[in-house]
Image: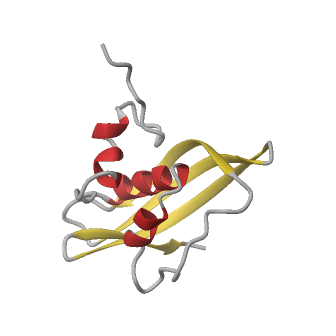
Amino acid sequence: MKPIDRCPCGAAADYSVCCGRYLDTELLPDTAEALMRSRYVAYFRARTGYLLFTWHPSTRPSTLDLEGEPVRWIGLQVRRVEAGGPDDRHGIVEFVARYKVGGRAYRLHETSRFVREDGRWFYMNALV
């Protein structure tokens, strides 16, 4: 039996049926939470193309540099989800992502805003 390759997003599922189905295929996430989780995994795996592709054009940077001091992503906890379902136009996802840089641990606590246009979810920005 093949060992389970747990998805880095924290879901109790194999990567290939969780976030891998978005990062490694043409399938698009159908909820804001699924997009947020897959974007976390894209940071985990340094997949800048996916991050830029899923960032709304109005707020997307022209480039995204994940080089520099290595970041090791070590955990994701989704705290709150508001709307963001398959039939919604907007969604909010609050999460805490834990990571290490140079052996020192950090936490990114963010409330993110997502928008769905033409049936496709995009990351807009962090609410402040």
Q: Does residue 4 lie above or below 63 as drawn?
A: above
Residue at 67% in and 51% down? 71
Q: Residue 56 at x, y = what percent?
A: 39, 78
Is residue 43 found left or right of 71 in the rendered image? Answer: left
Residue at 73% in and 49% down? 106
The quadrant in which the N terminus is found is: top left
Q: Residue 6 at x, y = what percent?
A: 42, 31
Q: Does residue 24 lie above or below 55 as drawn?
A: above
Q: Residue furthest top?
A: 1
Is residue 112 found left or right of 19 in the rendered image? Answer: right
Is residue 25 found left or right of 104 in the rendered image? Answer: left
Is residue 4 found left or right of 67 in the rendered image? Answer: left
Residue at 42% in and 37% down? 7
Numbered marks: total: 0
On the image, which quarter does residue 31 sit in? bottom left
The quadrant in which the C terminus is found is: bottom right
Residue at 38% in and 59% down? 82
Here the colouring is secondary structure
On the image, which quarter does residue 117 sit in? bottom left
Q: Residue 11 at x, y = what percent?
A: 41, 36
Q: Residue furthest front?
A: 67
Q: Which of 66 and 94 is in front in this view?
A: 66
Q: Does residue 95 lie above or below 121 as drawn?
A: above
